[in-house]
């Protein structure tokens, strides 16, 4: 396995430049072309590349990262999947808690809460005996005052956008409407954490202090240039633009039904990961079975240089690698035996094992893989069939480790099958 990874890194990879948009488009196209959205390859490849480049960030150590987690994917019913679009900023699939709240807030200060803003209630099991009806009314008023005081402290900190994972009742909404703030209830915790990251805010679990009082610190607020509500399809979405903590992007997927949207979501996420890995690790390799076939030819030759039983293991490993190009050919309804044999001959020549009339090999042939449309071999690097090299090497490592784990199992326990009904009657 180590020899295989070393050979891939030294001979079968090409460096990619972040400014070379064509290469990034080819990486995305290779990932998308075999999926449901393959009919709209150009549209989704462009969307994926723009989304990844828009979230570029540089860490404190100077490393360039393209975090896929900074890209939010929202699925919305209606229209065709070609109507899917990229929106600058983070989109939250939720609307304002009340229509009286403003639709747009500039220079937003975002409060991120993980507690409810409903009227305070006594804890379960607490009993209060009241003889005077006026005292009962005072208790009810105190419960309302506790919630009102909590909301006033949040607003006093400068917050004009309030997001909470729990509920907001009508009494609390009145204060937010009067203050001209946007409040959103029942926000998913995953979305709340993402918004906290890009706005440099802090999710507040409680306002209680060590002194037994309640306080809301203004340093917990996140900031962004603009927060506004926009209707997409049948749902309202809250857009966060110009976030202080980093760049964010949102891909809004359109489709006829839930099943199609789920499939498009998986396909787009795979493409985002592929382009992100290609940019972060800066190397790509050809697809179409080129890497596996070249590696198989190399390992067969390498095995013959060993004088121990390791030769058999490496030869078997080399033979197993040919499953990939064979499966590709079979899936395309082509003659797998003939195509793989032809591809092996090409890579043998590329590695100098087969020489031409002048006694030379052709190193450019190392990029050759299968062309399943015409049933021939071609230079897949030039044709744009490429993928991230790190994905190929990791897949090879994980597959080898999984095979070794299975081979180490020396005992197998089987549960005795239940006797059939006829045998029980006998």
Image (tube, helix red, strand yellow):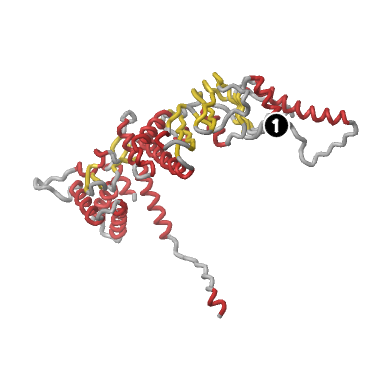
Task: Depth check: give the residue in front, 342 or 175.
Answer: 175
Quarter of the figure with residue 341: bottom left
Res 376 visible:
yes
Q: Circle 1: is it few (<14), some (14-19), or many (20+) Cα within 10 Å? A: some
For label 1, the SS is loop
Percent position (x, y) of residue 150? 70, 26
Percent position (x, y) of residue 17? 32, 31
Up-down: is 107 above or below 353? Answer: above
Residue 352 falls left or right of residue 243: left
Q: Residue at x 67, y 26 (%)?
A: 173
Residue at the limit of the structure toward the right, as seen here = 131
Q: Residue at x 41, y 42 (%)?
A: 267
Quarter of the figure with residue 113: top right
Residue at the limit of the structure toward the bottom, as seen here = 426
Percent position (x, y) of residue 238? 54, 28
Res 325 visible:
no
Residue 123 falls left or right of residue 102: right
What is the count of numbered marks? 1
Task: Depth check: give the residue in front, 102 or 402.
Answer: 102
Up-down: is 310 above or below 146? Answer: below
Residue hosting label 1: 118
Percent position (x, y) of residue 133? 88, 31
Q: In which quadrant will I find the C terminus?
A: bottom right
Residue 333 falls left or right of residue 184: left
């Amino acid at each position: 396995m180590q020899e295989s990874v070393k050979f891939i890194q030294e001979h079968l990879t090409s460096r990619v430049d972040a400014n070379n948009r064509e290469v990034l488009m080819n990486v995305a196209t290779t990932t998308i072309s075999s999926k449901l959205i393959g009919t709209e390859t150009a549209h989704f490849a462009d969307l994926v590349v723009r989304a990844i480049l828009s979230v570029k960030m540089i860490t404190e150590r100077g490393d360039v990262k393209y975090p896929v987690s900074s890209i939010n994917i929202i699925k919305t019913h209606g229209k065709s999947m070609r109507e899917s679009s990229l929106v600058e900023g983070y989109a939250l699939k939720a609307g304002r808690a009340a229509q009286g709240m403003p639709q747009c807030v500039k220079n937003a200060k975002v409060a991120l809460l993980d507690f409810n803003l409903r009227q305070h209630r006594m804890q379960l099991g607490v009993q209060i005996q009241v003889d005077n009806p006026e005292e009962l009314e005072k208790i009810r008023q105190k419960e309302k005052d506790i919630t009102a005081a909590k909301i006033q402290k949040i607003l006093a900190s400068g917050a004009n956008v309030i997001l909470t994972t729990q509920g907001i009742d009508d009494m609390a909404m009145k204060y937010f409407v009067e203050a001209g703030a946007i409040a959103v209830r029942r926000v998913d915790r995953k979305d709340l954490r993402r918004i906290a990251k890009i706005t440099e805010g802090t999710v507040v679990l409680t306002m209680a202090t060590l002194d037994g009082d309640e306080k809301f610190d203004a340093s917990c607020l996140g900031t962004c240039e603009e927060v506004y509500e926009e209707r997409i399809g049948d749902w309202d979405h809250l857009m966060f633009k110009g976030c202080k903590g980093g760049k964010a992007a949102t891909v809004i997927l359109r489709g006829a039904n839930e099943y199609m949207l789920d499939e498009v979501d998986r396909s787009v996420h795979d493409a985002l990961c592929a382009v992100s890995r290609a940019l972060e690790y800066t190397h790509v390799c050809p697809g179409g079975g080129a890497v596996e076939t070249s590696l198989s030819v190399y390992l067969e030759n390498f095995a013959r240089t060993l004088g121990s039983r390791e030769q058999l293991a490496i030869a078997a490993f080399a033979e197993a690698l040919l499953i990939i190009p064979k499966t590709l050919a079979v899936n395309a309804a082509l003659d797998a035996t003939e195509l793989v044999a032809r591809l092996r001959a090409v890579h043998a020549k590329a590695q100098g094992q087969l020489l031409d009339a002048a006694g030379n090999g052709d190193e450019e042939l190392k990029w050759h893989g299968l062309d399943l449309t015409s049933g021939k071999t071609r230079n897949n690097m030039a044709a744009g069939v490429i993928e991230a090299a790190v994905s190929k090497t990791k897949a090879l490592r994980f597959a080898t480790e999984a095979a070794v784990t299975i081979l180490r199992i020396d005992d197998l326990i089987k549960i005795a099958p239940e006797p059939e009904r006829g045998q029980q009657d006998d």
